[in-house]
């Protein structure tokens, strides 16, 4: 089964890292990702840019509005995702807990629901 692990950082924890600590964390994450890939688990791992670089999009009554940044002042932010294969939720939690990011973030792991494939006629 495929699982999505969302990495939720505490804003203050990540901001307090020195440049050297950030580089070490990045190196550790790359090694972790490589290990998942070698084990046949990794589908995708991707870091997200800081919330201040994001845009919020809303569509109401057919009108689109775009604002800078997140919806509100936040204490935690979605900093990345890991999409991977695991045999069970227990294995998925074990994989998520080994991430170097677990020292600075909370991980939210969820199995992905497969939707039936559409046929051309249904499109």
Image (cartoon, grey):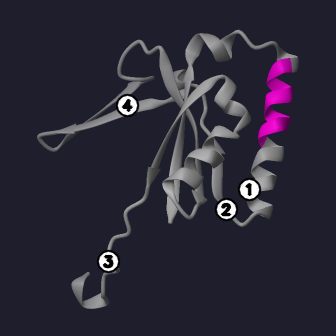
Q: Which numbered disc flags the more N-terminal residue, 1 or 3?
A: 1
The residue tagged 3 is 116
- Most frequent secondary structure within the magenta stretch: helix
Nearer to us of marks 4 and 1 is 1
Tell which tag, 3 or 4, sits nearer the viewer: 3
**Mark 3 to mark 2 CA distance (whole Å):** 23 Å
First in residue order: circle 3 vs circle 2: 2
Q: Are marks 1 and 3 in contact (CB under 8 Å)?
A: no
Check residue 42 for magenta coloring: no
How far apart, in angstroms, are the residues tagged by discs 1 and 2?
A: 5 Å
Foreground: disc 4 or disc 2: 2
Q: Which residue occupies 54% across, 45% down? A: 5
Position of 113 with respect to 15 (left or right) is left
The percent position of residue 99, horizontal first and vertical second, equals: 70, 39
The residue labelled by disc 2 is: 41
Q: Is residue 78 left or right of residue 13?
A: left
Q: Is residue 81 above or below residue 85?
A: above
User: CB atoms at circles 1 and 2 under 8 Å apart?
Assistant: yes
User: Sequence-wise, which precedes: disc 4 or disc 1?
Assistant: 1
Residue 47 % position (x, y):
64, 39
The image's mark for residue 36 is: 1
First in residue order: circle 1 vs circle 2: 1
Range of magenta residues: 21-29
With 103 as the anchor, is 22 left or right in this view?
right
Task: Please tell me whether mark 1 or mark 3 is closer to you in this view.
Answer: 1
> Which circle marks residue 56 in the picture?
4
């Amino acid at each position: 089964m495929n699982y999505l692990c969302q990495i939720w950082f505490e804003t203050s924890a990540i901001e307090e890292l020195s440049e050297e600590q950030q580089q070490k964390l990045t190196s550790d994450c790359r090694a972790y990702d490589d290990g998942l890939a070698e084990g046949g688990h990794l589908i995708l791992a991707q870091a997200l840019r800081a919330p201040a670089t994001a845009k919020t999009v809303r569509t109401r009554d057919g009108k689109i509005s775009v604002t800078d940044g997140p919806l509100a002042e936040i204490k935690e932010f979605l900093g990345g995702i890991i999409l991977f294969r695991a045999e069970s939720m227990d294995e998925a939690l074990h994989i998520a807990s080994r991430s170097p990011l677990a020292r600075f973030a909370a991980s939210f792991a969820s199995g992905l629901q497969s939707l039936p494939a559409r046929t051309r006629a249904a499109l």
